[in-house]
Amino acid sequence: MSRFLTQIRLTCRTVIFRNRVDQELDEELEYHLERQMQEGLNTGIAPTEAAPAALRAMGAIAKSKEECRDMRHVNFITDFLQDIRYARRSMRRSPGFACLAILIMALGIGANTAVFSVVNAVLLKPLSYRDPDRIVTLAGSSTTGGKSGARSKQVSLPDFQDWHDQSSSFEAMAYYVLRETSVMVGSAAEYAQVTLVSPEFLRVFAIEPLIGRSFSSDELGPGGSGAVMISHAYWQSHFGGNPSALGQAVRIYGRPLPIAGVLPPGFSFPSKTDIWYPNNRAATEPRAADNYLVAARLKSGIAIEQARTEMTSIAQRLEQQYPQTNEGQGTALTRMRDEMVGDVRLTLYLLLGAVSVVLLIACANTATLLLGKATARTCEVALRVALGASRRRIVRQLITESSLLAFLAGGLGLLLAYWGSQALVVLAPANLPRITDVGIDRWVLAFTLGISMGTSLLFGLVPALYASKVDLNDALKQGTRSVIGGGLARMRGMLVVAEIALAVVLLSGAGLLLKSFAALQNVALGYRPENVLVMKATVPGLFTPEQAQRSNQFFKDTLAQIAALPGVLAAGATMAPPGEVGSRGGYFIDHMPAQPDGKEPEAVKSIVAPRTFAALGIPVRSGRDFRDSDSHDAPFTAVINEALVRQAFAGQNPIGRSIFCPFDTSVAMTIIGVVGDVHQYGPARDPMPECYMPYQQHQYNGNTLSIVARTAADPTALAETVRRLARERAPEVPMKFTTMEAKLSENVAVPRFRSLLFGLFAVLAVCLAMAGVYGVTAYAVGQRSTEIGLRMALGASTGSVFRLVLRQGLVFAVLGLALGSVASIAGTQLLTTMLFQVQPNDPLVYLFVAVLLGAVTLAASYIPALRASRIDPVTTLRQG
Amino acid sequence: MVSKPTDLVQGTVDLLILKIVALEPMHGWAIANRIRQMSSEVLQVGQSALYPALHKLEQQGWIEAEWKISDTNRRAKYYSLTRAGRKALTDEAANWERLSGAISAIVRTA
């Protein structure tokens, strides 16, 4: 190792103190010469003869000096520095070319680096926990392969307890469940992300409180006093980072809990948790109540497969022991990182693929530029070869030039990537895991350096090899009057065709995604999202009848107040605004069996206030909306949607019939109205049957509702007034404002992100390809000006010359389109899962791509064609 | 990295240099002289072979150089063996023993 360091140190010394190293070599040999002379004198040679004799004895000093320099890599380094100097000079000679090439490559490298920085942060970086590879998630899964067997991914308390007690692969195993809920710190109520955890939760992540202490056994136990941990961020924002926060109480669900500790900065699992508190409920839960997520830490040295085997056998035991609930129920073990990035992985890798295609096009573009330069430099290269430069030396020099170009482009690209990655963070869906970690770190730097060097070879090698193959005689004979070389022209043509083909691939991908996104936007939502203010509010407290009454009163009063505000057209409230689902389950028409068999049809269940349909713009098809008179002591009523009518009342009138929706009560409800369908799970999924129930008759689930208010103008203007009114009446109620439009756009954030970026890359690709076509055609016209002049002198019309050039562009377009279409048909298969109502081989998209690229290619060759047709034969022939 | 046995001449010069500077730090002239003396004038290493070899060995990290005042009161570059060089010397010497033994065996029987 130290030897290796010595070598590096010596090489560095050679680079930095080149002159000194040379000097020392001289001095060393001089000393040798001196001693040789001295020896001569000692043996009796005449003083005048001593020096020549010594020199004779030593032989060729210059040659051995050169060898010594080789040994020290001096020559290699000086050659390199010379090449760099030469490259700099040649760049300065043609600054336009250098700027263009650097800019093109910087765009390509910058875009790639920016996307990579996101991929790096979201997918590649290890989780910032200790031994992140040992942290896994456990979930329920179906052993039959199909979806039907499994209950859900979540786990019930009794199952968890058995997994925990019977397994030996884990150092710690914990369950958790995250809720956004009302928290009071001091006198202010607000929403916080609160996670209920089991005792070993912190041990799964191997973390200790930054300040304070862990939960005591009394706080952890069932029926215990309880306590909370808060996140570092919450500590900063709510307690100013003051250690006196320890011991202060926060109220959750009306229960005061003291702060036991603050967790280290950066830890906020799951999602963006502010507060963790242990589960103290003594009550047992049924084995089928799947309410929890499970994380565990593998014992060191235990492979994930081992743990899987163990968990499978435990699940099989439970299947036999509890066939009623656990039949077909298995377990799935996943590394936490894989679990976190599950959905976005494909999107991100796809984007990385798309942006690397842009880089390939940029490389091809730069290669054509360099090839153009190589022709112009034939003479210079020939001269250097004639003066004794070896072919290797020439290639090396040209490669150094393109490396310098790539290096500068890489630097500029890094700058672009810095802004680009910030833009990506803004554009990215907000729920992308770890998106806030995006930045330029050493891996991103290494990536940039790698692709810079890689691309320099990609675009530099072909021109360099070509240039070095120059035929000395031909080149020197022709001097500056070169006729465009057939091989070179073909090479440039091939590169342009490749550029067009790659652009076709990107453009078809973008076209498909955009068409799919448009289809998503055009889905008839079943409600009108514009100008609707959404205010989520939670009346805190335990689930008691008095509490339910209080919640009900709060919403009733607030709704009355909001409805009276100027500019409010209608105001209602709902448990789950469109795009969310609060609850779903089986329903029964007319009568309910004593023992449901679990095979009944399912409907979404929602609790709403009167006038909610009007506020959301959901049309009432028949019957009526709820009224304030549908109160707790009035007969129970329900409103159903058309999908439910289609499912359960084919050809019958549902009004007046009874429906049972076991929710908080199982009483019969009279259907009083039918409303239009809403896409409950967002536009990408079809509407489900839905049963609406009035909030006054289902008060137990009425402590958290979203008030929806349709306004005449901008709904956000209303938010402050509503907040003030609600605060005045009930300061303990936290509120959160948004609009229906904002919620909708969150719903389609991922498709929007990928179609936007894909579209952006496609535009970039088309621009680069267009520049390539233009460059090659313009260059060819320049090279052939003599020939064209001659043709015109011999009687060719301007029109025929114009068509001659345009035809070349057309050939590029046709070849590129043909190749690109074949590649797209294969490549766009990757998009299948991301497309909505669009097939990967949508003919319309391909037609559009073909027409667009054909037009663009012709446009790009139009100006050179025009220039060619205006060539003055007299001038060109005289010049020639 | 031990030089290839086939690279006989170059390898031999390297081995001789390593062996000589193992005794004490020495400058180039003295190394050449010592080789001559120790081989009873049989082996003569000229500067054209000596200095490239010295610079190569230094670059490889087997010997290190230091400027010192010589016995003739002039600045001279003294080479000495590094720890890596000592290991290389053992390897090279063993290699040489093996090789020369093998060659002798063939020469004698023939």
Image (cartoon, rainbow, N blue to C red):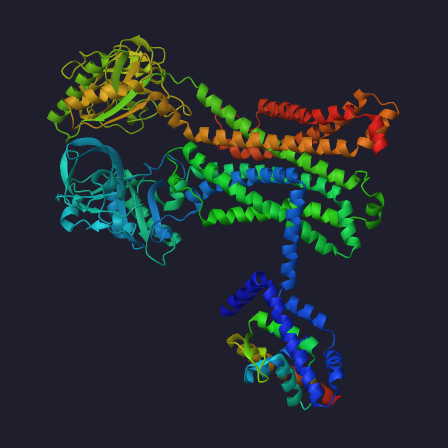
- Residue A640: x percent and y percent? 30, 16
Q: Is the residue A873 above or below the residue A81 in the image? A: above
Who is closer to the viewer here, A600 or B87? B87
The quarter holding residue A750 reads: top left
Residue at 16%, 40% (x, y): give it.
A281
| Quadrant position of the C terminus of chain A in the picture | top right
Most distant residue in the front direction: A48
Q: Is residue A469 visible?
A: no
- Identified at 46% across, 40% down, the residue is A418
Query: Is A410 on the left-hand or right-hand side of A497?
Result: left
- Left or right: B60 in relation to A636: right
Front one among A441 and A615 = A441
Total labels: the figure holds: 0
Residue B77, relative to residue A240: is it above or below? below
Quadrant position of residue A369: top right
Q: Residue at x 33, y 45 (%)?
A: A138
Residue lying farthest to the left in this orientation: A546
Q: Quadrant location of residue A555?
A: top left
In x, y percent, where is residue A128?
A: 35, 49
